[in-house]
Image (cartoon, helix red, strand yellow):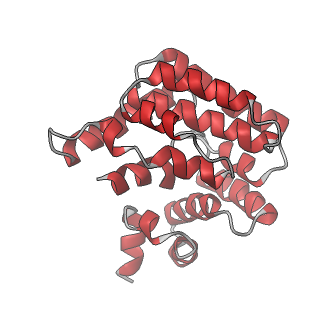
Amino acid sequence: MKTLIKLLLAGSLFFAGLGFASAQSAASSTREVVATTTDTSTSIVETMDTFLPEQLQERGIPTPPHIEKLFAEGNVTQALNEFEKFKEKQKKANPYDLLHCEMTVYQQALIIDPSNNAYAQKVTALRQELIERYPNVSDTYILQIDDNKTPEEIVELANKALDLDPENVHAYEQRGRALFKLNQIKEACADFEKMPMSWKNVMPEYWECRKL
């Protein structure tokens, strides 16, 4: 179950690229998926205890254990307050990575409380700040992908991301899905092969590739 939550959030880029209303919808949808795949003795926050540390460590910023614990206990407000204190101490952290981590933290808060407009607005604002302040970073091109982009536009953005970072697995995921929609199945399957197995295992498109 923990693996499923990590994949729903991280493997599909979470909803970093979605607008305000879409972000809340995605958060609610994630909770609905959880409700159908876990027993009544397991809460959503208990299943997410490995998501935040993995995401922040990916950015080279290890998460303080007490913040992870607060999220796991559902103490969202206190967790966010503690993260703000933690953020102020990260004088040597890469500014882009720190801002991206802040967005990730608020995304987790929104997953726990998808009806919270303030969290959704914060996610959207941080995403926009990343796009405007750091336009030539690989992940920034991925952040520009939203539900209004055509498959062709997604392929173009993913290509730009990969030009800057050929190992950006998020770009391979997005481009692969877009190529699949464009019926360029062979090329899509090649992109899926660049992704971690744990991500591919929850992608219907990947299993279609396996049938070929």
| Foreground residue among 134 and 186 | 134
Q: Is residue 119 left or right of residue 98?
A: left
| Foreground residue among 66 and 182 | 66
| Image quarter of residue 103 | top right
Residue 106 higher or lower than 101, as above or below: above
Return the x and y of residue 197 as percentages of the image width and height. Answer: 45, 71
- The answer to whether residue 187 of the structure is visible from this angle is yes
| Residue drawn at point x = 57 percent, y = 49 percent | 55
User: If the image is split into quadrants, where does the C terminus sit?
Assistant: bottom left
Return the x and y of residue 173 as percentages of the image width and height. Answer: 56, 61
| Residue drawn at point x = 76 percent, y = 37 percent | 131
Return the x and y of residue 180 as percentages of the image width and height. Answer: 50, 65
Q: Is residue 197 left or right of residue 195?
A: left
| Image quarter of residue 176 | bottom right
Q: Is residue 67 left or right of residue 44?
A: right
| Foreground residue among 62 and 39 | 62
Q: Is residue 102 left or right of residue 108?
A: right
| Image quarter of residue 27 | top left
| Residue drawn at point x = 80 percent, y = 50 percent | 137
Residue 84 higher or lower than 40, as above or below: above
Residue 14 higher or lower than 73, as above or below: below
| Foreground residue among 89 and 37 | 89
Return the x and y of residue 146 as percentages of the image width and height. Answer: 59, 41
- Total of numbered circles in the picture? 0
Q: Residue furthest bottom?
A: 212
- The answer to whether residue 13 of the structure is visible from this angle is no
